[in-house]
């Protein structure tokens, strides 16, 4: 688990946007081998989308070979309804970038057979090669997508009845009229999210501090579905200072120190291990293509984020022995007085 | 004056593909707000599209993305009172005959569109019956072909007269003025019976409501789907109110050619302050050229009825022509000095030669209106007056893709100035002030 703490929502959002851009560009997607991106809606990700759009306009990122899967959609509200997630995605992202319309996937809450729609959605994700990076947000009760408290941590895409809390919270978008708020939604399951090769979650604001605390410091618990991320090999949570209000000082310091150390050593905190996803894809290819598939994958290793020549051995160490090497470094740092630590950062 | 840029390239390529164009990085004029949104249009249908539907339902990506660099994207401007321009007068039948007249209209349309006016009402001043009968067939709605190369589009003719008050004739020739004593039959006799039937070329008629037979005429015209405006009139407040009850919707160039406001008898002007619940306040035309009206008067009426204010040019054939003295009808001559036009013999104001976009600039600077409020007076409000608010003067889905790209420049003295950078008609670019090489 990585926890990145930034001063405010803007800085946290920018971090995630830059991270996604870096991941897509390093992946170097083609139309045959697109980058598959899972996307959320809600207030937290708005700034992330803004930043992605700005970067796209500046020519720094193209989404031409990106396939997107959205997390959820209300049942039985018109697609053009201003509060539908179709509208949200159009307004904040799709209308501003060059994602190919055919590569956009959002659950259809008006499908005749909702069960079938959900089943097909899972299959579509499989056909696209699985989700490379799932971006998410959470509710104040720790739900990811519409996986409300009590959702099975093994759940798949399905029809979900919304919790009373969620309906109350959403009523502000529907003229404060509870009768107007959709009662059901289609949503990817917790397991659908966990199946992604990487999960990145944004959590900002004091009102989500308790949820963050439960998900990081508490145990895996279906009442806080995001806590399932503890079982994921490559999760990253990016938060603002407000969201850390309920965390122990020790926890905050620990995660901050990890980021500091990696920065000092000349590379941002990346896990080269996630590159295993590319190998996985290579072997997934049909036998006839295997040779070329491997060729495709190999240069990906070369395009590592090794801005500094130091990175190669360093990243090898992290990827090989992440568990043992990290505590050693941290133990070393932790011995040092905090004043000296901050002095070093300032320098 | 910039000329029209040929845009064949755009047009040809649009025909062979989806023709979906997305305007981005622009400020859309929507209601009383400027909204940072994209606008999707089709150069094939010439209409404004629902971008969300295009994306999700038709799975179509835009074929062309137009980055407007943060400029304003407004619906095309609408002028409901234009007597002529570029040396052509809608009220004069040329000696060469009607073929020449038809060419003249087309020439005006093509030049006019470059000023941002994408649709308008070609306006006839008071004329003898034969002029109406000859001219009107050429002035009816011209947008049916939806061909951008035709330039600006007539939404139908505006007949300003001849059923006007002989004492408020302005520069209209008093000898041709008439009274609709026998109401509709007099109108039929004047304009030609076919011109008042279904699919009439006439969209708007200005008449004086105090004339005998005027009220039943207003009712009859309204039943024929012809909008009535009152003006060139001596009407009292009560007479004006009766005309609104009969169906009149507008006041032609408010203040000009009518009784001034008297505090005990407010006249036509009083309609803007009507306490009556039985009538709606009418729309009203305003000539914001700095000559016809004092800026303070404009601000007063805007505050009185902001949703009714329609900016018009009342420009005549000398609009777009160099300064000088020009022959007018019946042996009179008109002196043009900038935007100011006067009759040589008596110095009376003889229409204007201002461009509509400059009226918007004046209005913006004089009233403190916001940019969308100022543009509304030449887009949404005139369209609503004409009952065409779903098709013209709007950026809503299904409306015609008649668009103007405006640059709002700072000028000396802290004032602002609208400059027409691009004009699009039916989703096709027809004017570009500074075309990229």
Image: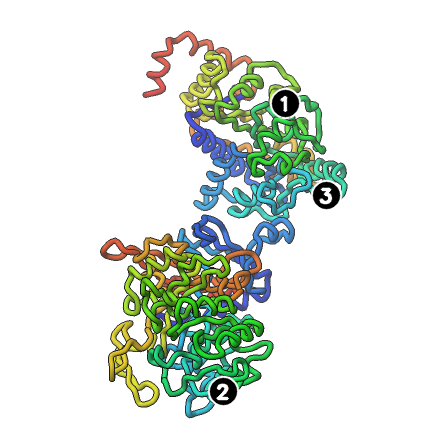
- Please, what secondary structure does the residue beneath circle 3 have? loop
| Among numbered discs 3 and 1, the one appearing first in the sequence | 3
Can you say whether B307 is above or below A143 in the image? below
Tell me which chain the residue with mark 2 is part of: B
Q: Quadrant of the C terminus of chain A?
A: top left
Tell me which chain the residue with mark 3 is part of: A
Residue bearing mark 1? A225
**Residue A190: x %, y % from top left:** 66, 27
At label 1, counting other C-alpha atoms closer than 10 Å, the crowd grade (few under 14, some 14-19, many 20 or more) is many
Distance from disc 3 to disc 1, alpha carbons, whole Å, reads 27 Å
- Please, what secondary structure does the residue beneath circle 1 have? helix
**Residue A322: x %, y % from top left:** 55, 17
Residue bearing mark 3? A111
- Please, what secondary structure does the residue beneath circle 2 have? helix
Is the C-beta separation of discs 3 and 2 under 8 Å?
no
Distance from disc 3 to disc 2, alpha carbons, whole Å, reads 59 Å
**Residue A1: x %, y % from top left:** 55, 20
Q: Please tell me which residue lies in front, B222 or A325.
A: B222
The reply, left or right, for residue A296 in relation to residue B101 is right
């Amino acid at each position: 688990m990585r926890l990145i703490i930034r001063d405010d929502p803007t800085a946290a959002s920018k971090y995630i946007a830059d991270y996604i851009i870096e991941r897509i560009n390093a992946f170097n997607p083609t139309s045959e081998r697109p980058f598959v991106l899972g996307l959320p809606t809600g207030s937290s990700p708005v700034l992330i989308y803004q930043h992605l759009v700005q970067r796209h306009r500046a020519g720094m990122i193209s989404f031409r070979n990106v396939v997107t899967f959205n997390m959820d959609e209300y049942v039985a509200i018109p697609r053009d309804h201003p509060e539908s997630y179709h509208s949200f995605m159009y307004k904040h992202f799709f209308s501003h970038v060059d994602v190919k319309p055919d590569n956009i996937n959002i659950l259809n809450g008006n499908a005749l057979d909702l069960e079938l729609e959900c089943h097909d959605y899972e299959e579509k994700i499989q056909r696209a090669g699985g989700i490379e990076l799932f971006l998410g947000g959470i509710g104040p009760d720790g739900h990811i997508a519409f996986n409300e408290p009590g959702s099975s941590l093994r759940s798949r895409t399905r029809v979900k009845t919304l919790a009373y809390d969620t309906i109350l919270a959403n009523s502000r978008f529907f003229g404060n009229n509870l009768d107007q708020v959709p009662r059901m939604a289609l949503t990817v399951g917790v397991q659908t999210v966990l199946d992604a090769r990487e999960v990145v979650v944004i959590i900002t604001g004091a009102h989500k501090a308790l949820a963050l605390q439960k998900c990081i410091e508490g145990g895996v618990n279906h009442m806080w579905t995001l806590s399932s991320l503890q079982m994921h090999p490559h999760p990253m949570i990016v938060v603002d200072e407000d969201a850390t209000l309920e965390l122990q000082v020790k926890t905050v310091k620990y995660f901050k120190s990890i980021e500091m150390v990696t920065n000092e050593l000349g590379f941002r905190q990346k896990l080269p291990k996630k590159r295993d996803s590319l190998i996985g894809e290579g072997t997934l290819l049909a036998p006839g293509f295997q040779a070329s598939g491997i060729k495709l994958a190999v240069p990906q290793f070369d395009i590592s984020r090794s801005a500094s020549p130091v990175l190669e051995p360093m990243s090898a160490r992290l990827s090989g022995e992440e568990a043992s090497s990290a505590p050693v470094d941290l133990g070393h740092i932790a011995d040092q007085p905090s004043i000296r630590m901050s002095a070093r950062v300032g320098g | 004056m910039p000329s029209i840029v040929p845009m064949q390239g755009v047009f040809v390529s649009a025909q062979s593909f989806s023709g979906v164009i997305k305007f981005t990085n622009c400020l859309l004029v929507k209601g009383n707000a400027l909204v940072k949104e994209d606008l999707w249009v089709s150069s094939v249908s010439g209409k404004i599209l629902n971008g969300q539907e295009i994306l999700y339902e038709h799975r179509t990506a835009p074929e062309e993305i137009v980055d407007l660099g943060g400029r304003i994207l407004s619906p095309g401007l609408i002028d409901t009172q234009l007597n002529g321009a570029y040396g052509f007068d809608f009220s004069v039948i040329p000696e060469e005959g009607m073929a020449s007249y038809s060419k003249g209209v087309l020439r005006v349309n093509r030049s006019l569109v470059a000023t941002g006016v994408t649709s308008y009402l070609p306006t006839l001043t008071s004329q003898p019956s034969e002029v109406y009968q000859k001219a009107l067939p050429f002035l009816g709605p011209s947008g049916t072909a939806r061909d951008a190369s035709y330039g600006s589009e007539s939404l139908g003719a505006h007949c300003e007269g001849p059923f006007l008050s002989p004492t408020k004739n302005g520069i209209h020739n008093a000898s041709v003025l008439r009274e609709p004593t026998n109401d509709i039959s007099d109108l039929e006799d004047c304009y030609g019976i076919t011109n008042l039937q279904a699919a009439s070329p006439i969209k708007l008629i200005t008449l004086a409501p105090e004339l005998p037979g005027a009220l039943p005429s207003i009712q009859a015209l309204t039943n024929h789907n012809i909008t009535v405006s009152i003006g060139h009139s001596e009407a009292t407040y009560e007479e004006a109110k009766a005309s609104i009850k009969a169906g009149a919707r507008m006041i032609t160039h408010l203040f000009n050619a009518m009784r001034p406001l008297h505090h005990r008898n407010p006249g036509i002007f009083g309609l803007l302050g009507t306490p009556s619940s039985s009538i709606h306040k009418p729309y009203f035309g305003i000539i914001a050229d700095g000559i016809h009206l004092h800026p303070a008067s404009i601000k007063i009426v805007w505050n009185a009825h902001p949703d009714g204010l329609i900016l018009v040019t009342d420009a005549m054939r000398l609009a777009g022509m160099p300064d000088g003295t020009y022959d007018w009808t019946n042996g009179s001559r008109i002196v043009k000095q900038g935007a100011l036009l006067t009759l040589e013999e008596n110095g009376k104001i003889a229409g204007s030669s201002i461009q509509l976009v400059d009226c918007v600039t004046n209005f913006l600077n004089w009233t403190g209106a916001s940019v969308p409020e100022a543009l509304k007076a030449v887009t949404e409000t005139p369209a609503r007056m004409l009952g065409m608010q779903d098709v013209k003067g709007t950026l809503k889905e299904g409306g015609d893709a008649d668009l103007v790209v405006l640059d709002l420049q700072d000028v000396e003295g802290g004032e602002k100035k609208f400059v027409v950078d691009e004009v699009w008609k039916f989703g096709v670019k027809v004017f570009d002030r500074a075309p990229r090489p």
